[in-house]
Amino acid sequence: MRNLLLILLVFGFALTQAQHHHEEKSGNKVTIQKAAEGQKYTCPMHPEVVSDKPGKCPKCGMELVPMKEQKPAQEDSDLKRNPKNGLVSFEGKVVRYDLYVSDSMVNYTGKHAHAYAINGQLPAPTLYFTEGDTAEIHVHNNLKKENTALHWHGVMLENKEDGIPFLTQKPIKPGETYVYRFKISQNGTYWYHSHQGLQEQMGMYGMLVFRKRGEAKTDRKVQADIPVMLSEWTNEHPHQVMRRLQMGVADWYAIKKKSVQSYSEAIASGNFFAKLKNEWKRMEAMDISDVYYDKFLLNGQPSTEYKKLKAGDKVRLRVANGGASSYFWLTYAGGKITVVGNDGNDVEPVEVDRLIIGISETYDIEVTIPENKSFEFRSTSEDRTGYASLWLGDGEKVEAPGLKRLMLFEGMKSMNNMMKMNGDMKPMNMKMGLQQMDANSVMYPEVPEEDRKATMKHLKEMMNPVKKSKPEKQEHANHDMPLQLSDSKADEQTGHNMTDKKENHGGDDTPLQLSDSKADEHAGHNMADMTKEKPVTLNYNMLRSTEMTILPADAPVKELKFTLEGNMRRYVWSLDNKTVTETDKIKIKRGEVVRITLYNNSMMRHPMHLHGHDFRVINSQGEYSPLKNVLDLMPMETVTIEFPANQDGDWFFHCHILYHMMAGMGRIFSYEDSKPNPYLTNPKKDWKDFLKDNHMWAHTATVAIESRSTHAALRVGDARYELQGELHTGYTKSNGYEAELKFGRYIGKFQWLYPYIGFQSRSRTDDPGENRKTMFGQFAEHDKRHVFAAGFQYILPWLVTADTSIDQNGKVRLQLQREDIPISPRIRGSFMVNTDKEYRMGLSYILQKWLQVSSHYDSDMGWSAGLTLVY
């Protein structure tokens, strides 16, 4: 009898487990289980704090969150690679992780802020796999209100596992669990992050390490292998950051970064005429980043240590830039940096003094501990407003060389030379590409002054080339290649004729290699001499794959060209002046080679990322051109990439500056005749939901409460359309009120033109000017006025807005105005004058991002002073 009961118990348990396993496999969703006994809790800010029960952190007082210990066994098994086609046979094991996404609080600045944690950590845990394994990752959404989804950055996988809400899967709703399952066919350094809205900025990112088969036992080249996740932190909610950028009210960020470049600063530094010229060309002040950050982090902390090292030890650092909008300079106090991998792909070792890592890029680098001391590995934000540190070794601390603040007015003068009056970059007599000519170097204080001047002079000469006879017209689009290959077999690099053998006509298609000691002479300047005193800086032309990367010779080629464009005034970023929501999917076919030529026609650099594929970056390495999944394009650069179309489904191609992506800078590549995605049962609706998720609306409002009047303004808009409203009212009947409402669409890539329709309303009594005529000889109608109108606004030089309108009665009004004239870092001026013989001028002092002291004089109401609230 006891044996029978035992059999029944075992059978019941087995049936329960089988049913649970079936639920996980069907639909990839299961119900979240209650925490098992023995659940541990930790502090997101202090992971060393571990408790058996919920409570508060004894160090900072934050709530403890559940943690999941991640120690999957790494069992060896054979990985077979077919020597003929390179395909991997998956004979590894299934490696499972459980990731719990939850709301959390962090305190990096003495102020608590909302964050997202994964398994109680920020950043999320590093996930380890071995080439040939199958990853099974259970994502439990414990967020209170928000959906989520995780993208596996740089990983080759089935389209349905890529983690893009409504494009490859349904979003994971609060309380749901989603199972990602994919085979590991790569090795190297990758990372993962949320692809739901702006969640990545709030902490949802972690590293992926794919080991080579057998690496754990046979690789003894390094004494330490350390994942390094770089990121930044802002106490401001990213939705507020995005709103401020879109509505042009991000002046507070420039104040915090000390990068306003006001007229008083221009006069003090002898750059007054450069400032005038800059605004004459309708440019905003020169800056190289959009957002002010409170802290820069390395593995979730401003500073961290790895002490178990001694003199002579070699360390591999697996560096990933998980920042939302920050590039980082990487420097090391202990000597040279050797680059051995990029975006998960091996490259021939390259020794440099420093490198800049683009947003979402990964680099595998090696450094050596020269003495028994602690040497700083430093990541400095590109705008040089802060840095984070990793200290390697034990003993006396040796700091890495610091990078001084940028000389922004030098950058302003450089941009003045590069920009045409219509907003486009000037054409050049040679192609720039592959990070070889850093125009920002004119702002680097560490570069000797004579070198900065020589660079500035050379840039001007490139913009104003000597007239020459036109070279013979080329036949192939790929002649936009930035470098002429030196390999005698360059024609065979892809199996396609990528370049004709031709004479070098003044360097037409060959950019300068400023960081290479063998730089050629161009335009009469020996560029090697220019860089003689500079540190050696990595660029893409130095990267050489360890294996040949040629593509099939007989494959058809699909040629695409994109121009990267955008403007800071309304924060619209696009490809060919179209956002991702304004375009259809780009159809591609399996078996063809997709070749893309990218030109950056904006003043900012853009890290362009392709999901689910590696592409070849065409450089001087010919058949060994490197493979990447992220390409950083500097202003004015032209670069050609290509990849074999060997996937299925829809794949995102976008700028990885998070706020640029959400502003529309991307495209969707869609494979023809793809099999249906089992997770997206209504493709038309899902596509509309995807577009809706990527269509950002924003709003801003100001209210000036002053002694004799109140002025309120409201703006609501998206990338193209905007509603504007204004109300100006006095405190007496004689002052009355004046209100205006406009709705229109911005035209052009720089959005200088805004046609609109609107309504104007005005009411006041005892107006001394009620019979006053306008400059056009029409009655001004100052007492009562309720009319519909149509007109347009246009941005003139010096950023003056010209507003011309005609109402239903035929009355014409022309108005000139400008807001936010930067008189000093915190003082702003404004003025308005129109053909109704009205005028207004004012001053304000910025106290906080939401508060100003303001004063103005109005031709109708006189002097007034008070406070202005800004939202």
Image (cartoon, rainbow, N blue to C red):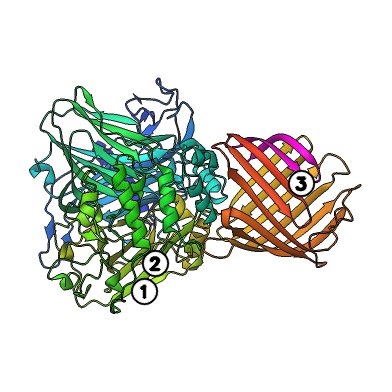
Label disc, if present, on residue 672 of the rendered structure: 1
Q: Which residue is mark 2?
A: 562
Residue 758 x %, y %: 73, 61
Foreground mark, 3 or 2, reads 3
- Residue at the extreme right of the image, as rendered: 766
Label disc, if present, on residue 269 of the rendered structure: none
- In depth, the one of 102 and 647 nearer the eye is 647
Q: Tell me, yes or no, if residue 432 can be seen here.
A: yes
Q: Which residue is mark 3?
A: 728
* Residue at x 26% of width, y 78% of height: 556
Q: CA distance from mark 1 to mark 2?
A: 21 Å
Is there CB contact under 8 Å for labels 1 and 2? no
Which region is colored magenta? 849-871
Foreground mark, 1 or 2, reads 2
The secondary structure that dominates the magenta segment is strand
* Residue at x 70% of width, y 58% of height: 742
Instruction: Say above or below: 471 vs 434.
Output: below
Q: Is residue 296 magenta?
A: no
Foreground mark, 1 or 3, reads 3
Which secondary structure lies at badge 3?
A: strand
- Neighbour class for label 2 at 10 Å: few (<14), some, many (≥20)? some
Which secondary structure lies at badge 2?
A: strand
* First of labels 1, 3 by sequence position: 1
Instruction: Say above or below: 253 vs 185.
Output: above
Residue 604 x %, y %: 41, 53
Which secondary structure lies at badge 1?
A: loop
Decide if residue 244 is on the left or right side of residue 224. right
Residue 500 x %, y %: 21, 75
Instruction: Say above or below: 845 vs 529.
Output: above
